Image (cartoon, rainbow, N blue to C red):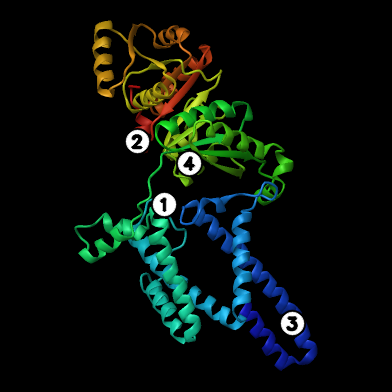
Amino acid sequence: MSAAGDIAVVEVARLLMGPLGAGAMLVGGLLATASSANASILASSRINFAMGRDRIVTPQLNEIHQRFGTPYRSIALTGAFILLFIVAAPINTLASIGSFLHLVIYGLLNIALVVMREAEPSEYEPSFEVPLYPITPIVGGVLSFALIYYIESTPSLVGATIVIFAAVWYLGYARSRTEKQGLLSEYILSRQEEMPDAAVDAAESVQPTGDNQFRVMVPLANPAHETELITLASAIAKQRDGVVDAVHVITVPDQTSLSYAADHVSRIEEDHRSVLDDAEADAETFGVDVETHTIISHRGIEEVFDAAADHEADLVVMGWGPDSGSRVEGAVDELTSDLPCDFLMLKDRGFDPERVLIPTAGGPDSALSVEIGELLQREFGSELTLLHVADDEQDGREFLEGWADAQGVDAELRVETGDAETAIEAAAEDATLVIMGASQRGVLSRVLTGSLVPDVVADVDCSVMLAERKRDRGVLERLRGLLKR
């Protein structure tokens, strides 16, 4: 119930129940009003927070309080607007304006339901479906907008002004900064040939024009490797004119509630803020933009996958932890999910990109390894060596020359015969960094024959980086596996 509704209830109680009952209801009404106001402030601040994340307003609103773990800037801004409105207009007028905006929102929510059901985006998997669709949302939308007719003219005019201001704000400010595209316009533009020209023109007129910056996300769990991971991520972001997204993932036991952990984050991990401060300072030495976030979770690497998808990362650079397995994907994820973006996993023994060895047998993961090697080459002047292990040296030479030419890479070519693991380990003696593409083999072939990646990681002396390209594969392909790497 809104604050205006609470006050109305108190007035009715005063007339019907007399002074004593009215007094009791007054206290209850004040408590209910305080509760409603507190809920409204907190809910509104989260809307500001989400708008900052999507760059509809400044991302500086996303700043999380070091001690309390709350979006304090969003809460402060919401509170400031509430105080301004209280001073500027009577409570009845404010309640009417609020009712106008709520009806607009309710109407748009009903329209959004229809859009979601018709567009059927891949991530839309509702656990409940409204009955009598599409009659229910259509009637709900029409009634919501129709009820605006009964609101007084002045509040309606103010509410309409706010709606118009929001549209102007998007077109004049947010459109050139945000990368988020509305589902309706995306649906229309994907079916331009079937849609009326007016609808296509309208969708194009509101389409975001913000630059799609290359985003490198760095999950930070171990401060000992923060510098190396941020250095690698910053070098890549600099060469791609991108941004570094440093995410400190704090894992708490299942028996610890996330709300409690957020309120006592400094007690759980005393240096949690210093990790992000150090990351920000290291990234700024490369002259790249850096964003920092703290995530409190009951999960480890699973949270990294979710964060990469939520932050729309193009590349994740993370340390090689004990729960990472021989691939970025764990055994369960192998059957149930796809990588949300490209991944690099660094087994850190001191990050030194002077001489980079890239073993390859072709494939998208090896292509990603070469791309990363070239970025390091441009940033640090790295010497690249491509290594191919074949049964026949001549055939191997022809393959490697053709593959390197297709990649357009400036690198020394090296062909070896015999055991792949032995050849890689021998070549790595002269390298300061090894970049390997992840095996494309599926579950069955990996279970039967194993993977040489963990053996190489364990046996070489330099740092090893595992590169895996984002790809969408079905369960059957995962089980069957590909024989090449």
**Label located before the other in sequence (2 or 1):** 1
**Residue identified by numbered label 1:** 177
Q: Quadrant of residue 466?
A: top left
SS at mark 2 in the image: helix
Q: CA distance from mark 2 to mark 4?
A: 25 Å
Q: Residue at x 35, y 57 (%)?
A: 120
Front disc: 2 or 4? 4
**Residue identified by numbered label 4:** 308
**Residue identified by numbered label 3:** 26
* Residue 442 % position (x, y): 39, 28
**Residue identified by numbered label 2:** 476
| For residue 100, above or below residue 175 | below
Does the rendering let one see residue 1? no
SS at mark 1 in the image: loop
Which image quarter is the C terminus in?
A: top left
Nearest the eye: 11 or 301: 11
Q: CA distance from mark 3 to mark 2?
A: 65 Å
Amino acid type, mark 4: Ala
Q: What number of labels is visible? A: 4
| For residue 204, above or below residue 267 | below
Q: CA distance from mark 1 to mark 4?
A: 20 Å
Q: Residue at x 74, y 83 (%)?
A: 25
Nearest the eye: 71 or 344: 71
**Label located before the other in sequence (1 or 3):** 3
* Residue 98 % position (x, y): 54, 75
Front disc: 1 or 4? 1
Does the rendering let one see residue 475? yes
